[in-house]
Amino acid sequence: MSHISSLSRLSTPCLVLDEAIMARNIARLDDRLSTLGVSGRPHLKTVKSVDAAKQVMARAKGATVSTLREAEVFAEAGIADILYAVGITPQKLPRVLALRAAGCDLIVLLDSADQAEAVAQASREAGQAIPAVIEIDSDGHRAGLRPGDPAILEIATILASGGAELRGVMTHAGGSYGAQGEAELVAFAERERDAVVAAATALRATGHACPVVSVGSTPTAHFARDLTGVTEVRAGVHVFFDLVMAGIGVCAIEDIALSVLTTVIGHQKERGLILVDAGWMAMSRDRGTAGQTVDQGYGLVCDIEGRVIDDLVAIGANQEHGIIALRSGSHAGLPDLPVGTMLRILPNHACATAAQFDGYEVIPAAGDGALRYWPRFRGW
Amino acid sequence: MSHISSLSRLSTPCLVLDEAIMARNIARLDDRLSTLGVSGRPHLKTVKSVDAAKQVMARAKGATVSTLREAEVFAEAGIADILYAVGITPQKLPRVLALRAAGCDLIVLLDSADQAEAVAQASREAGQAIPAVIEIDSDGHRAGLRPGDPAILEIATILASGGAELRGVMTHAGGSYGAQGEAELVAFAERERDAVVAAATALRATGHACPVVSVGSTPTAHFARDLTGVTEVRAGVHVFFDLVMAGIGVCAIEDIALSVLTTVIGHQKERGLILVDAGWMAMSRDRGTAGQTVDQGYGLVCDIEGRVIDDLVAIGANQEHGIIALRSGSHAGLPDLPVGTMLRILPNHACATAAQFDGYEVIPAAGDGALRYWPRFRGW
């Protein structure tokens, strides 16, 4: 039995993961980080699966998460060093303390004196120093303090003197998702390094140890050339890759490990449209390639074996209807795909598409053609 | 205890449903349909909750669903008349037959001779006539056959002579979501009626009974003036309403029953940004108001009591970060909302936002301030 005949028996839409491609993607970044002499701290918000996390974490010491629910699930699965990389609120500190009491070295993130006061107060009340890293803004993307902002030293002092622990500094060059080409990506990676190294240097000059100096985004992780002064790199979507990453130039289409298996449900022949049962409920509403050079609509269409069909994209999506057509301007002929034909659609954004499903139908890297199922979780 | 103090104790982000507003929205459409002399066949893809469906179905005979999983869950909960309103595939017919064998009058949808052959064959093999409605295209939106297309009679003959059952015709004016103002909405409703009544008339002229003549979308359901010849109306998002529906003019902002409760996690004061813990994982990536007169970003921001804060919108979203700012051109002042402040964000598209959560935190229409929890389901 081949894995194609296994796929053909699945109910659609469903989420297909090619384990061999995933393993190659994980190894690619791990090898890079080894060469650069830094640790990886993979972001597990992409996989949200204990089975997948085991492979992602094989060569990593710590993990990154985007929700306390992720921290709780992965801590339960044995991951003992976790950075919760979203700004902490006072209300969330009881769950942080519970995780730490259960043996997980959970680190929180902050960028204001108010948050530092709350973390220090909770540490004192619990008789346990909560470690925090200060978010540094390296590219004006979202959160964090600019290196040189006096608030950085103020926060460090509140933490250290208030009963908490200053673990270090981190930045995320989210702006790199809008980059194009090698030179821009290299520049984003240099800005990440420069920003956190400057902040760490200033903190150490005033007596703070600052052991963690953390950078990362999937684009910068793959284009950084020199990470002197950096201790760890975070990335998440590199595990699966997607059309947005291919559009930026971080991966090739063949590196995309994730796809949505779907079935043709109808046609509008005069208008050149093929309807499938993967709408936005399956693909997500993410249109991350809309601003890129090649707009892939709601996804690039492949046959059931995962081979791209020339110029065929999901040009529209309703809740449970995907609308497939040739890319605007294409000279290819619309293929004959009768009702019942199964296809696979590559996602714009792997994190968003995967989140629409309860688990992965995994094509194992080796085996007899039988699929495996890896459950996902969600929630906060 | 007030329901506000109950809300303030929830972990964020979470999904809040105001039951009193929902009840008013349901009654509004039910009353309209009574006046127009037609039945409702509510679309349960919006609520995906047995608890909510009980209220939606109180005055309706049949239901509409968008997945077989919805059909299975709602049939199990006692709803015995269900239209699966997405084009049927041969692979899904075993599940259809299983539901029918369990006592649910499940109706399938099709618009091609190939699908009719498959339904007829499955009916013969099971010794049980599967009922089908033919999809009619009233506005060029997506699927279906134009009234007058000879394929309609061909399909009817294949079904009736092949052992299946022609139950009737249906249309969905999905194009009405792009309408603006009363005149356009009334016109869409008239096109829906004209298209299905013409198709039903042609079918009856050739001896087919065609008992079901079904129209519907939330905008047309609220603006139809005359439904002579129509037997039932489908709508779904009217239960909760959302910013897209308010933008079209189908409801007021005060009619939106659904919101995402969130907490402030940081600021970029110089840039006028407030960060919250509701990113696109909570709001969804739906940007349905982007093409409307008023672009509401990823949602319109309210205080914890649900009162709109002037001109405050979620201008951006990352996976777990919402970015809030004053609407472009606003003269309002940015409110002071310290880290830990709780807010509620109204969604662009209720179906998409609700799908990001496992359940509703329900503010009951009456009670002592305690919230209820209504679980949601998902999957296919």
Image (cartoon, coloured by chain):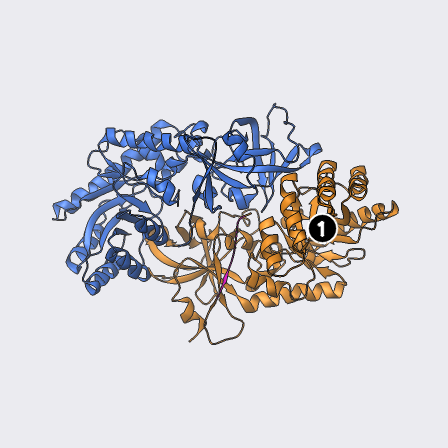
Chain colours: A blue, B orange
Please name the residue shown 15% across and 58% down the image. Answer: A161
| Residue denoted by label 1 | B188
Residue B248, percent from left and from top: 62, 54
Which of B6 and A3 lies nearest the eye of the viewer? A3
Which of B80 and B65 lies nearest the eye of the viewer? B80
- In the image, residue A47 lies in the stretch drawn in magenta: no
**Left or right: B335 with respect to B61?**
left
Residue A135, percent from left and from top: 27, 48
The residue stretch that appears in magenta: B373-379
A223 relative to A212, above or below: above
Disc 1 crowd, CA 10 A, few/some/many (<14, 14-19, 20+): many
Q: Tell me, yes or no, if residue A145 can be seen here.
A: no
Which of A343 and B185 lies nearest the eye of the viewer? A343
Q: Tell me, yes or no, if residue B214 can be seen here.
A: yes
Disc 1 marks a residue whose amino acid type is: Phe
Residue sitting farthest toward the top: A331
**Left or right: B327 with respect to A87?**
right
B20 relative to B203, above or below: below
A292 relative to B165, above or below: above
Pinpoint the chain carrying mark 1. B
**Left or right: A91 with respect to B213?**
left
**Left or right: A60 with respect to B65?**
left
Residue A204, percent from left and from top: 14, 45
Residue A307, percent from left and from top: 52, 27
Quadrant where the N terminus of chain B is found in the figure: bottom left
Please name the residue shown 32% across and 32% down the image. Answer: A29
